Amino acid sequence: MLKEVFLGVGLAVVAFLALVGYNVFPLLVLAALAGTILLLLNRNGVGLGGNARKMEYTGSANFTFDMIGGQNAAIQELKEALEFILEREKIKSLGIRPLKGILLTGPPGTGKTLLAKAAASFTDSVFLAVSGSEFIQMYAGVGAERVRTLFRTARERAQKLKKNSAIIFIDEIDILGGKRGSNISHHEYDQTLNQLLVEMDGMKSDGQVEILVVGATNRVDALDAALMRPGRFDRQVKVDLPDKDGRKSILLIHTRNKPLADEVDLEQIAHETFGFSGAHLESLTNEAAIFALREQCNRISQSHLREGIDKVIMGEKSDRKPSPSDLKRVAIHEAGHALVGELVNPNSVSTVTIRPRGKALGYVRHNPEDDTYLYTQTALENQIKVALAGALAEEIVLGDRSTGAAGDYGQTMNLVRHMISAGMSSLGVVELEQLPQEKLHDASTEILRELEERTRILLQEHLTAFQEIVKILEDKENITGDELRQCLNSLKAAS
Ligand code: ATP
């Protein structure tokens, strides 16, 4: 409104000057120049409220901790830290220094933003969320000004809403709080971080608005030591990938508003999604609902959820139409993976398909036995055998290998290196970084040759079953783990 009044008055003055014969051309050039500069500054959020415009603001966040699954330990720790805000009088009477910052650390999509939101509603605080990247601009001083605006806005909003506290959530805090001097345009980065430190140091428990900064990162190692000093980010809460029970509770949360068929077994879906974050699981349930819609079903079935898993892991089905000879090779390759997978680890195969999805022409999805955090030598060797089986199957049946196995080799080499670093090679216990390349190469080759040989023998011993799987795949393009096991059992019974 103020802007419009100024503009109107300015135009009137210029018109008047022009009427009385004054040369207004230089004035118009100056006004255009000033306008452009203001526009640029506003776009970059330097002006008052520039930063506030970008912030997510939920005055009375009604997002509660029970809407977050699989993070019980993190929630417990966070709630304990939040006692500082809830029990501020008691804290003050004991002379305890107020808590200024909490750092949430963990992989992307595990619920760090959700935890900060829930913390705001738990403590009846206003909530402002920004991302570290929003502070960094090419203009010197912009970041520091944004930090000042952020804290001022938090105080003002809390006062306006008559709240005693505000939670400022800074996602990707490593961008803004990385080690000083480590960036090319480090002056701007350093100024921004310095300003954040100044604001945090200036936060007082003076009966006015109490501010708590919640930072989130998955790169604690990259943070400047000054941020981690006592009195700044005093508490660190680890937000890890959920375990099986955690995944089930997240699936329950995200299917609350979705009609599920009676046969749906979320426990099984949780079992099949080892390594998924909360964000992956949310996406899985959403994709499953989309599949149900496409098939005009009123309810989401187990197979829709399973397809959701494939979509999240491999990407959307692609329109690529491989030639008949490529299709045959893909069927042979995937049958090799699936057969060896089932032989070395019974009941482990979940799906085998030769329908292209994402970048893959086909794939086998395995179920983990259970959430596994430790691997024995046998388990690692079995994984390598399964990875090598695709290319070996091509070699046995078609006489040569193809480029389709490139990804398998990458996975194989990682597993081999893992074995060597865990002291499972003929080198004994070694430090991988200190090992000469030649020795590493020799030890890797030795492991690979032996496992290749053992896998080849396994495939040759089960050639009939292998050919049967190839035939079914060529026919149906897709087999579930149960169908595969049925086929193997009936062949065993017949022999
Ligand atoms: P990033 O580090 O990438 O910013 P984040 O850890 O902050 O990720 P969120 O933004 O909190 O992750 O989560 C993204 C989405 O994933 C949420 O909106 C929610 O739908 C889902 N989600 C993630 N974790 C959980 C969880 N523990 N419980 C329920 N839903 C979750």
Image (cartoon, rainbow, N blue to C red):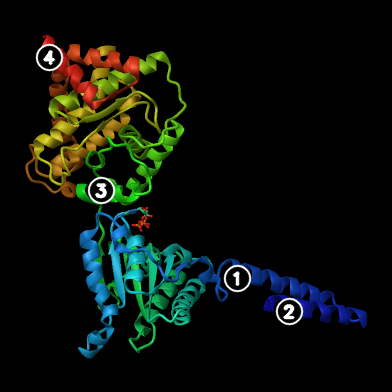
**Amino acid type at image mark 3:** Arg
Q: What residue is pinned by disc 1? A: 41
Query: Quick one: label 3 or label 4, which is nearer the N terminus?
Result: 3
Residue count near mark 3 (Cα–Cα under 10 Å), binned few <14, some 14–19, many ≥20: many
Q: Quadrant of the N terminus?
A: bottom right
Which residue in the structure is indicated by mark 4? 492
Q: Residues within 10 Å of mark 1 (few under 14, many from 20)?
A: some
- In this rendering, the answer to whether 356 lies above or below 209 is above
What SS does tag 3 mark? helix
**Residue depicted at x 33% and y 86%:** 205
For the residues bearing labels 4 and 1, Cβ distance under 8 angstroms:
no
**Residue at 33 percent of width and 15 percent of height:** 474
How far separated are the C-alphas under marks 2 and 3? 57 Å
What is the CA distance from the residue labelled 4 to the residue labelled 1? 75 Å
Q: Can you identify the residue that label 2 sits on?
A: 5
- Which residue is disc 3 drawn over? 247
Q: Earlier in the sequence, mark 1 or mark 3?
A: 1
Measured Cα–Cα span from mark 3 to mark 4 = 36 Å
